[in-house]
Image (cartoon, helix red, strand yellow):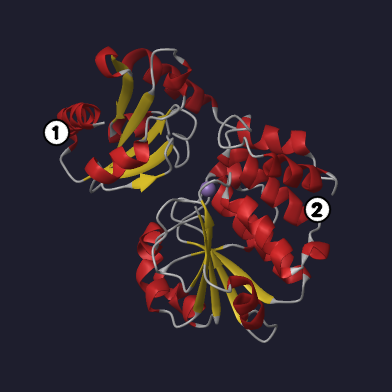
């Protein structure tokens, strides 16, 4: 499913002129793809002589703060409405609905700027006039690469652009283990590598850059907290606020942890539940045809991709486990 607004290429080329002020926005709790895609596009447009700036609705996870341009990102706060209101063009990178920007959503929605969505999540909303979205593509960063080529701007891809886009592709494919069977993905990676990026250093900084406490948290979760429901080949873990504090848990720490139960032959769906102040946050992962996007959309006020999704439950933490078990049971009996 490739959604390209009719005559997208010509219309966007006409709009994208150097007298315009361009804002690039990622999603709330930005991941490697949203950051890599946004910063790659940022450097590209800057190299090409455009007036461009980057905003994220919330802070970067620690393991992404080394990215080229990370220090140039504005983190959205109410006063940043000026930033949004001054933009003529706004790029949405790696999200399909403006609600994914949480606290920045209202200002982004109300802005009169022309909005261009560069994404790969299913069912893009009509929050952008121009949509370049393809669920078959590994990452929004890969979409950004295709977008750059479409504009005829590939001569402006330098080492910074390449490092950012590579980081997005690598992280969204879990180091090329999922969503990376299209030959085009590797052709793009090959082109990025030829620009002299340090692939091994990117891998190290992303994957081997965590705290000792996080490792102990993983041990604790897998040993003490993980439960498996063998009837449904499903595993889940709940983490309370108290436990989060005890292990100095940071945003982004659960990335990776939720994948671990899937290394078991008989587990096809994994779910991690994290208590927040006003709600309970969920992260879901699956193997093969098990569609956690559907599960998250139907029961957990969320969504995402077939094999990776997120959601929220607006119930007291003490009631969440029962709700999850009944939801998963219902889901498996329907599908
Ligand atoms: Mn992505």
Location of residue 228 in the rendering, given as x and y in whole percent from the top left corner: 30, 16
Mark 1: give few (<14), some (14-19) or many (20+) Cα within 10 Å.
few
Quick check: 109 left or right of 312?
right
Residue 66 percent across, percent down from the top left:
66, 47
- The residue indicated by pointer 1 is 319
Residue 70 figure quarter? bottom right
* Label 2 within 8 A of ligand 1 by Cβ: no
Residue 276 in view here: no
Relative to 76, residue 134 above or below: above
Which residue: 31% across, 24% down?
A: 236
Q: Using the image, tell me which numbered label, if any, was put on residue 244.
A: none
Q: Picture quarter containing residue 329?
A: top left
Marks 2 & 1, CB-CB < 8 Å contact = no
Circle 2 — which element? helix
In the figure, residue 126 lies in which quadrant? bottom left
Mark linked to residue 159: 2
Q: Secondary structure at mark 1?
A: helix
Provide residue 284's location: percent of width, then percent of height. 37, 34
Between 98 and 63, the one lying in front of the other is 98
Which of pointers 2 and 1 lies earlier in the amino acid sequence? 2
Looking at this view, is 133 or 68 the one in front?
Answer: 133
What's the residue at 58%, 47% (across, down)? 137
Using the numbered discs, state the Cα–Cα distance from disc 2 to disc 1 in whole angstroms.
49 Å
The quarter of the rendered structure image containing the C terminus is top left
């Amino acid at each position: 499913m490739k959604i390209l607004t009719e005559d997208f290429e010509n219309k966007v080329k006409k709009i994208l002129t150097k007298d315009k002020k361009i804002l690039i926005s990622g999603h709330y709790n930005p991941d490697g793809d949203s950051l890599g895609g946004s910063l790659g596009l940022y450097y590209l447009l800057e190299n090409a002589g455009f007036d461009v700036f980057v905003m994220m609705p919330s802070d970067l996870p620690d393991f992404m703060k080394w990215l080229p341009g990370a220090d140039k990102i504005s983190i959205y706060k109410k006063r940043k409405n000026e930033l949004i209101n001054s933009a003529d063009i706004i790029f949405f990178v790696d999200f399909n609905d403006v609600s994914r920007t949480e606290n920045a959503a209202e200002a982004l929605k109300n802005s009169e700027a022309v909005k261009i969505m560069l994404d790969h999540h299913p069912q893009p909303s009509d929050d952008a006039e121009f949509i370049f979205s393809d669920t078959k593509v590994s990452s929004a960063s890969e979409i950004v690469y295709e977008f750059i080529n479409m504009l005829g701007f590939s001569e402006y891809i330098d080492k910074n652009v390449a490092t950012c886009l590579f980081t997005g592709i690598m992280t969204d494919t879990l180091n090329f283990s999922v969503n990376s069977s299209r030959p085009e993905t590797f052709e793009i990676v090959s082109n990025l590598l030829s620009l002299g990026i340090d692939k091994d250093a990117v891998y190290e900084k992303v994957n081997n850059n965590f705290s000792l406490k996080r490792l102990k948290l993983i041990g604790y979760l897998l040993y003490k907290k993980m439960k498996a429901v063998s009837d449904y080949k499903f595993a889940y873990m709940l983490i309370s606020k108290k436990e989060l504090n005890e292990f100095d848990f940071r945003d982004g720490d659960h990335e990776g942890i939720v994948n671990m139960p899937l290394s078991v032959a008989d587990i096809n769906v994994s779910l991690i539940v994290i208590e927040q102040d006003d709600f309970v946050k969920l992260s879901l992962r699956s193997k093969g045809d098990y569609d956690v996007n559907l599960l998250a959309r139907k029961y957990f006020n969320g969504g995402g991709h077939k094999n990776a999704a997120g959601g929220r439950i607006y119930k007291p933490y003490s009631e969440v486990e029962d709700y999850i078990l009944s939801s998963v049971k219902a889901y498996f009996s329907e599908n």
